[in-house]
Image: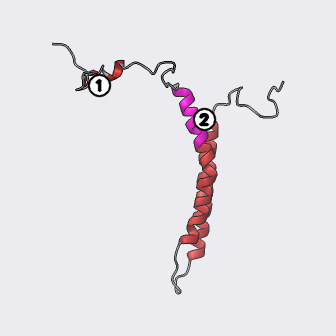
């Protein structure tokens, strides 16, 4: 009995199986290497950390306090500094995992010329 893979089954219209569908003429299929894809996503995360920091700084402004409530400012300060510490830890982790490529290195030691 042949092993049938449902992903390779022909479509009802009789088209070729999806796994064997030809690529568009004159255009190679889209394939991203796993390592470069992860590096791009890590760089995206690094770019979004300042935005997350801004959101963390703005969240205590949206808290509502009643007239008799005390301790609201202290809780906001603790929240902001805890978020700040979390961002520092996340930035350290992301920066350690990002690989610096020679093509994207624009630091002072980069070979220009």
Quarter of the image where the N terminus is located: top left
Residue at point 61% right, 49% down? 49
Q: Is residue 103 above or below residue 91?
A: above
Q: Quadrant of residue 84?
A: bottom right
Give the residue furthest to the left: 1
Circle 1 — which element? helix
Q: Tell me: residue 22, above or below residue 70.
A: above
Image vertical order of residue 34 relative to residue 67, above or below:
above
Numbered label attached to residue 97:
2
Question: Disc 2 to disc 1, how far (Cα)?
Answer: 35 Å
Magenta residues (range): 34-44
Query: Where does the image place residue 28, in percent across and percent down from the top left?
Result: 50, 20
User: Can residue 91 be seen?
Assistant: yes
Residue on which disc 1 sits: 7
Q: Is residue 95 left or right of residue 6?
A: right
Q: Residue at x 57, y 28 (%)?
A: 36
């Amino acid at each position: 009995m042949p092993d049938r893979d449902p992903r390779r089954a022909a479509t009802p219209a009789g088209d070729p199986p999806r796994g064997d569908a030809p690529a568009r003429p004159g255009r190679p299929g889209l394939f991203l290497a796993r390592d470069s894809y992860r590096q791009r996503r890590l760089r995206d995360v690094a770019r979004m950390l300042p935005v997350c920091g801004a959101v963390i700084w703005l969240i205590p402004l949206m808290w509502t306090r009643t007239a008799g409530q005390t301790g609201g400012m202290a809780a906001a300060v603790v929240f902001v500094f805890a978020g700040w510490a979390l961002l520092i830890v996340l930035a350290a982790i992301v920066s350690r995992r990002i690989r610096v490529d020679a093509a994207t290195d624009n630091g002072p030691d980069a070979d220009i010329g």
